[in-house]
Each structure stands twice: as C-alpha cells, then as structure tokens.
Image: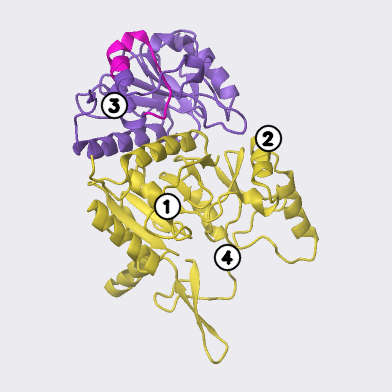
Amino acid sequence: MTETFAYLDEDSKRSVRRTILKALAVPGYQVPFIAPEMPIAYGWGVGGMVVTASLIGEDDRLKVTDHGSDETVNAVNIRAFFTRTAFVATTTLTREATLIQVRQRVPEAMLAEGQVVVYQVPRPDPLRAFVSSAGEAARMHAAADYGRVYTRLFEERTGSGSIAQPGYDYPAMVVGRYLMSPSPIPKRDNARLDNSPAIQIFGAARERRLYALPPYTRVESIAFEDVPFDPGYPSDGRRCVICGCTTSHLDHLLLKDDGTSEWVCSDTECCAERMEEAASA
Amino acid sequence: MKIEIDQRGADRIHEDQRAFRRLLEAFSYPGKVVVLAEGQAAHAVVLSTLADTTTPLWIDESFADIRDRAVAARWPMADRASCTFALCRGEMLDRIDVFPKGTPADPHLSATVIAEVTGLSGGAALNLSGPGIGPGARTFAPLGLPAAFLAQWTCNNAAYPLGIDLILTAGDRCACLPRSVRLEISDVRSR
C-alpha cells in the first residue's frame, strides 16, 4: 500500500490513535507519543498536524486558526496542506466545523458535542517551569506532588507584587489530579476548556507528548480558596477598531504617534459575525 | 509464501479512519452506543483499527479465528498479564485485575480490554459519572456482564490514574468505559 491520505503513513496514524485513546482515559496526563515528522519545522504546529492527520477523513470539515485568526500564515498554510493531502472541505465557521485545529486561542464561538479541537502545544509540561529535569517532573506528576506550584503562586501573592506567572499558558488542574498546560492561550481562555462539550486533544511534537480532555471534564486554573483565579480582563477601556467589541480578547494592533493604541479582536470569526450583525441591524 | 491478511487495499485507509472516529466518539462519551462499521463485528473492527505488530495481544480461545489471523499477520501474542489489547467474552470480566493497569509513572501502559457481551442494552441500568458524562447524566444497561463485574470495576476506579480501559461490543455496536468512569446501579430497589 503506497498511497497516503493526509500525508501521514497508516502505521504512524495507528500509533497516534492508540495514544489519543489513552490520553482520553487519563485526562490531563501527558502520554509519550511518536510525533512523526511532517513537512514543516518542529515548533510550527507539527504536534497539532500529526493529531489532525490521524483524525481527519473525507467527510470532515476543517477549521484552522492561529491566534484566533483564520487568515494568518500558519492557519492558511495548515488548512491548505490538508486540502491538498486529504481533499477535505474547510470552513471558517466554528459551528460548521467537525475538526478544529488551533494555536494560542480557544474558539470563542460555542463548541458542540462531537466536535474535536486540536491544540498545537510548544511546552506541554507546566512543571518544567519549576524543575529542569523531565524525570523529576514525571515523578512529581506521578505522585501528584504539586506543592511547589502553589508555593510559587503564594510567593507571587506575598512578594514584590510583580506577577511572574504569565498572562498565558496558565496551569490548570484536570479533574483534581493532573496539572496541565492549557497551551499558550490567554489565561481568560482557560474557562473555555472547562466542561466543554467538545473533545480536546493537545499535541506537542518537540517534546513528544500528547494529552487530552474528554468532553465535560473539570478544568480549574490553579488558585487558592481565598484568592480566586484572576482571568486577567483588561480594564483600560480598549475596544476593537473593527467591530467595537470590548469583551472579546483583543490583540494589540499598533501604537500610534500620539501614544494611544489600537486594538483588534483576535477571533476573526466572531469579529466578522459582529460586523454582519451590526450591518443588518 | 506471503500471507495476505488484510486485502482491503487502499480502502483500508478510509475504513480505519471512519471506524476510529466512531470509536473516539464512543470513548469520549462513555456509555454511548456507536456502530463502528455497519454489518461488521465491532470487536474485530477495534483490533484491525488499533492493533499491529507492536501491540502484544491476548485473545481468548473463543475467538480462535481472529487469533489465527492475528498470528498469521505476525501480531505478537502475549499472556493476560502483559497484553496491550485483550479480546474476551463479557463473562470473563469477573476478573479484570489480571490485566496490566500501568504504573504510576506510566499509567498509559495499561490494557485496553475488548469484551463481547450479549447486548449493550436490556441489562440492569447503570448510572455513569465522570469525564465525558454531560448534563442530564447517562445510563447504560449492558447485558451479559458477570455479577462480580461491578465490584471489579470499583477496584479499577480506586486504582486511578492506573486501571484498564474497557470497550464492550455486541454485534456491530460498541460502547466504552474508560477507567475514569464510575458506575452505579441506577435503582437499588429494582435489584
């Protein structure tokens, strides 16, 4: 059998498929996976592409976004790749998509049962921010030894007041057992991972790890009982220069000569929808 | 002599893909009954979709034809304690602690057990809870599981994150019970 579909060979797909099932069986646990090479450099979404290639079929309708946008280079090229190698239909509408590959955002539109969201992940292990050894991190996961993470959180709270924890890739606890990297999504997006009706699969090719969230799985951003998680909503009154939205996640577009900034919705689908609604109103 | 086991040729790519996506759905929404491939035995479809020369199998004697084909395809055969996939009858699920359940560092190195049962409905109703079970809960009433199964499954839950994952099949249909799913008899009085 020499033909391939969606670029990847069948042996690799079968191995990835087995990994996906085990990842779903233990939500949030990073399963080692083969991460075969794709015709794109590691770090540009190979993990996500391998998962997508192992899932995709002729009947699928694929949506790909990068930073929430359907039109950025990474999204356009990955979409073109699967159009050419798997002949699938594509869409920019979340509700029409059966398979959605994303990078750095969770779609803002509602997800539905049966949909699969595939995340491209650069750094799958949140513990590697605390320990340099992968073996030690694995031991800590095995023992659910997450004390150091909470200590860091406490130190940030009581220390200089500076926030060492970034506003993206904020660690989350899955069903109270495994600490998980949500991938570099803004921390406000963590809430969209929780209790989602869709199947969510995370592929990290460089680190050769794959993990997953079955639908309706409890995902909690790490916090203390008396110091709740801060989703980091901006308070500077910024609004999208295209649709005027103030509640959507906004990307910095440019800094003007007078020192003021322009912002634009990162989720192009929702921005376009708001524009259409405004036009027809 | 070359033993041709799988003569489906290029169609296989699409058949495997369709079967896997349906299996993914069954695995993600535990207890949901799904047809893997119309008119084909689901237990055989699971194996042909997921197993290969890298996955040690334990296949019960009652599936001698599948075992013969697996051996001819050079799929490795193992005993129950060291298999990646096991294929057996539902009655044999009175002992699931004999299968590998992984290790604390590698909970994924556990067996996926495929068990053919009498039916996926018509038995005592079980309430499911855990990941994959949405609002409104889900009941599942497989027929042909041994009396000891529930106690065994509770032990499997207790070992979490270790444990086996179960794929129940009946004819061309299947439903899955990953290790994270808890089972409760839905109405104690009806026993």
Tell me which amino acid carries mark 1.
Gly
Regarding residue A92, the answer to whether it shows in the image is no
> Which residue range is magenta in the image?
B53-69
Q: Which residue is mark 3?
A: B45
Q: Which residue is mark 2?
A: A143
Across and down, in percent, residue A41 comes to 44, 60
**Residue at position x 42%, y 63% in the image:** A66
Dot 3 surroundings within 10 Å: few (below 14), some, or many (20 or more)?
A: some
Q: Which residue is mark 4?
A: A233
Q: Quadrant of the C terminus of chain B?
A: top left
Chain coloured purple in this rendering: B
Q: Which marked residue is nearer to the observer: mark 4 or mark 2?
A: 2
Q: What separation in Å lies between label 1 and label 3 (alpha carbons)? A: 26 Å
- Looking at the rendering, which quadrant does residue A34 occupy? top left
- The answer to whether the residue labelled 1 contacts the one labelled 3, judged by CB atoms less than 8 Å apart, is no
Q: What separation in Å lies between label 3 and label 4 (alpha carbons)? A: 48 Å
Give the chain of mark 3.
B
Left or right placement of residue A165 versus residue A21 in this view? right
Regarding residue B118, the answer to whether it shows in the image is yes
